[in-house]
Amino acid sequence: MKQITIILSIMISLLALTPVDAQSNKDRDQFEVQVDGLGCPFCAYGLEKKFKEFKGIKDIAIDIETGDFSFTYPAAKELTMEAVVAQVVKAGYTPNDAKITRASGTVETNKEAEKETVNEVTTSKIYVNGMCGMCKARIEKATTAVDGVATAIWNVDTKILTVSYDQNQTSEKNIESAAAGVGHDTNGTRATDASYDNLHPCCKYERAN
């Protein structure tokens, strides 16, 4: 009889906890970010460590191969898309598509409006210094963000950025400045020491004197 009483007590306790857990899940926002530059478990650890600065973060999951990063966070703290994207950058990586599913059911994304169609396309090849896939993601993100640029593809081996753009809207100089602005020297524009120093350790290329 005593054993039956104990079992019943345990079952009642579990049933009492279930609504609390369900309610807890309803009070959390779901975050999903596609991150470029996660080449190894050490990279994933660095990203996770940086995000643990957000007190209350849970359910962290990182897929190194795809760069998919997700976690949940208390809805009451109202963590913004801007703060999440900025934290990825602070960790030394490049955020791409990001999505927040709020506890209320609303969905937010960071997708920018589509670029205006580029009518008069010019293609140039620009030398941009860098080291790895993380550099590639950073360089391409910075240069495609320039108004008038249609596409920008950087080759890790040759260090050549092949960029298509509308010369009525921008120029090679502007594109080089965008790459230098995120720490990568070009033949025509040198990055500031501060932007170079801010690069992830594996991205520190040898600079020309």
Image (tube, rainbow, N blue to C red):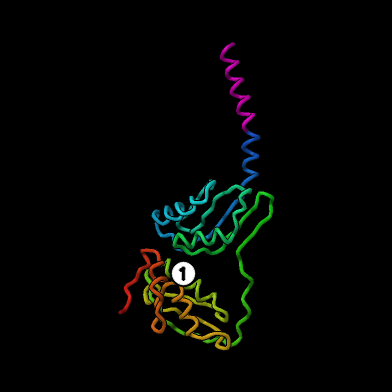
Number of marks in the rendered image: 1
Q: Which residue is mark 1?
A: 138
Amino acid at pointer 1: Arg
Q: Picture quarter containing residue 33?
A: bottom right
Quarter residue 114 falls in = bottom right
161 vs 73, nearest the viewer: 73
Image spot of residue 209 (x, y percent): 30, 79
Residue 141 falls within the magenta-colored stretch:
no
Q: Residues within 10 Å of mark 1 (few under 14, many from 20)?
A: many
Q: Position of residue 179 (x, y in %)?
A: 45, 76
* Left or right position of 155 against 119: left
Disc 1 element: helix
Left or right of residue 194: residue 84? right
Is 18 above or below relative to 118?
A: above
Q: Where residue 112 sits in the image (x, y, percent)? A: 61, 69
176 w.r.t. 100: above or below: below
For the residue pair 208 and 43, the one nearer the viewer reads as: 208
Which SS does the magenta portion mostly show?
helix
Give the magenta-colored segment's residue range.
1-17
Q: Image quadrant for the N terminus?
A: top right
Please report the residue visible at 61 percent of the width from the left and 24 percent of the height from the top: 11
Kindly identify the residue that appears in the image at 44 percent across and 76 percent down. Answer: 180
